[in-house]
Amino acid sequence: MLETIHSPRDLKKLPIRALPALAEEIRGVIIETVNARGGHLASNLGAVELTIALHYALDLPADKLIFDVGHQSYAHKLLTGRGEAFKALRTEGGAGGFPSMAESEYDGFTGGHASNAISAAVGMARARRMRGERHAIAALVGDGAMTGGMCYEAMNDAGQLGEPLLVILNDNEMSISKNVGALSSYLTSLRKSAAYVGAKRAFKRGLNRIPFIGPPIVRGVDAIKRTIRGALLRDQFFGKLGFEYYGPIDGHDIPRLIRAIRKVMKCDGPALLHAVTSKGRGYTRAEADPGRFHGVAPHFVDARGPEPPAERTNGEIAAELLLEMADADPAIAVITAAMPVGTGMAAFQRRNPRRAFDVGIAEGHMVAMAAGLAAAGAKPYVAAYSTFLQRGYDQLIHDACIAKLPVTFLIDRCGLVGADGATHQGAYDLSYLTHMPGMIVAAPRSAADLRRLIRLSAHAGGPMAIRYPREFEKLGAAYDSGSAFRLGEWEELAAGRDAAILALGQAVPAGLRAAGRLTARGISCAVIDARFVKPLDEATLSRVAASVPLIATLEENALSGGFGSAVRMRLCEAGSPPATICFGIPDEFIGCATIQRQRELCGLTGEAVAERILQKLSELGRAPSGGGREAG
């Protein structure tokens, strides 16, 4: 059936009774594709029936469907003419892993981060009213995203707006890690009522079988139930925000979903349809362990035997050291935002449950709460992906930096991150962190340096950010081991007279490769591990500037406002600076591809760096001097 569907119009040609079989076909395609390409599995499997019902009941693209986060949009892509592109999911030129307005007219909004869909829907509802239009607007929101405060800001606004607007709450009891917080408990209480509803349905079926008197009794019971339930729900949480509440209903019952969506769309104000789904539905291993099957690597799905030992992530290495430090210091605590597993902090959480805090998808609260911990004498370590820490920007300045509180930010997945694409690149943290007064910003090149920086953070006396990728490239014993350093101190890895590369964090290997290529061409090139972006090692920078005619900076961060910008500004302030080249992520959003391909696109490979340095030296009229130590 799926091969015949190129748009929701084709879907509607199928009888409703055929849709459950279509759902299973879609699941098969999702599992097969994710196994080949990697991606988000459990969340997408759980949303298949819900997605089919929405496409059947709505009139897309005239109506607008907005996905919160987008972890659940794979079935949507398959139903909207992207079957061929889906085969190349999360690769260059293929379908992205999240909704994108640039990818399809059926994507009502570009997604990737949580809790913004209702806000976008309210904006669209206002635009609809301004233009005098009447189309439907629906936002599909996961229960994990509902831990984000932005949802309630938007619902509060929607309640006062009073415009027709449908929020579908996809309630599967999970975000990435298990949901936390009071709202999760509230949804659990509503969910339990779903079992009660099921029992009532069975009771009604029995009554309907009684000749003559059965059906009238059922109609009377239904009328009483609607009156009582309506009165109760008007006084409950969503009703207080101005939403008509419907549910909970089985999120895998397509006919019931279609009827419910059509009914709720007739509301003359905002409404919320609560659908209970099973994350990982239809794939036993994912249902049993949805957290582990949230996002998977290629060929993870069919790896049924014992898994090979995985390389430890940098987050797990950081957690291991924090466990050691916490044994000696009872003030140490760890905070995450729905990501204890992704950030590697699950081990700390298991051993120190009273000092590990998962606040849900609420990064602003996470940062402010960490500042509160520090103000009360604790030593908090905030573990977050770079792309998500952006959501706590105001709190970083206002709550952590102004009061000079000793909060350490462990910023994982920094730089280019590969297949997750533009919404998840960790490309901006250096730019927004380095302009915050009092913030120390560092980037290790190896696991050994990461451990040293974490130990150093205990004595920083104020806020400190340590950024690192998921894993470091192995540099060999000469460069991996490292040596002790002080706050703000850089390290010379290779000497040179013709040029110097100041490389940062995971860009150090490319710097060493570039220097090696330059040496082979007779260019003597120094390589400096500039592990501290703030404070800069001004003594080393001044010495290098006085000894070479050309300095190149190398970072996996946006060029605008990044490490290179800071170096250039300092050199200009010092007067008579050498020529400079800044290598980094250009002023554009980097789409899906492998990390290596993204580095090629950004000119961040050793080969590209060496060629640009050679070209610049030629423009400066500098002939190779020869000599210098071979650098990788």
Image (spheres, rainbow, N blue to C red):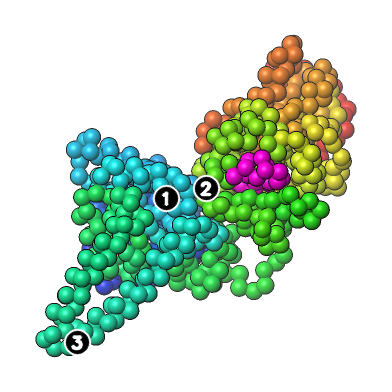
Who's the residue at 27% across and 82% down the image? 203
The residue tagged 3 is 209
**Residue 591 inside the magenta-drawn segment:** no
Q: What element carries label 1?
A: loop
Quadrant of the rendered image containing residue 569: top right
**The N terminus: image quadrant:** bottom left
Side of 534 where 203 appears, left or right: left
Which residue is more in the foreground, 622 or 428?
428
Q: Where is residue 144 in the image (x, y as percent from the top left)?
A: 48, 56
Question: Can residue 525 be seen in the rendering of this structure?
Answer: no
**Residue 373 inside the magenta-drawn segment:** yes
* Residue type, mark 3 in image: Arg
Question: Can residue 228 be seen in the rendering of this structure?
Answer: yes
- Looking at the rendering, the stretch of residues picked out in magenta corresponds to 369-385
Who's the residue at 71% across and 14% down the image? 573
* Residue type, mark 1 in image: Asp
- Badge 3 or badge 2: first in the primary sequence: 3
